[in-house]
Amino acid sequence: MVNALNNTGLLSTFSSCQGHYDDHEQELQDRNKADVRFDPSDKIRENSIEKFLNYLMVEFNNEYSFDPILLSTYKQYSPNEDRSNPDLSTWLN
């Protein structure tokens, strides 16, 4: 899935996880949930990514309707590379 997402050109993944083995039992834990984190590619609007993810979800649910998928998305803000001190007064007015 990660390779397929990266191949779209819409985004670039930087982290993915779908569960771990329990240390003492070596049984898979809840692997029904995947956490995939990505950055949009340059000049790609969030709207395009949302439409693409919706398309994937609908197509998957049409093909495998016995076990529909749920998709939760959220935007996470993090500091950018520019560490200069911005003039905060421009944001407060």
Image (spheres, rainbow, N blue to C red):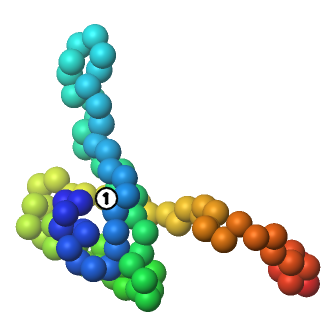
Residue 80 visible, this orientation: yes
Q: Quadrant of the N terminus?
A: bottom left
Q: Residue furthest left?
A: 63
Q: Position of residue 81 (x, y in %)?
A: 61, 68
Name which residue lies at 31% across and 58% down.
70
Q: Which residue is mark 1?
A: 70
Q: Secondary structure at mark 1?
A: loop
> Is 7 displayed left or right of 89 in the figure?
left
Looking at the picture, tell me which residue is in the foreground, 7 or 49: 7
- The local crowd at label 1, few if under 14, some if 14 to 19, many if 20 or more residues have their Cα within 10 Å, is few
Name which residue lies at 32% across and 45% down.
17
Name which residue lies at 60% across and 61% down.
78
Residue 58 visible, this orientation: no
> Is 75 displayed left or right of 59 in the figure?
right
Q: Position of residue 8 (x, y in %)?
A: 23, 78
Determine which quarter of the picture holds residue 11. bottom left
Q: Is residue 69 above or below residue 45?
A: above
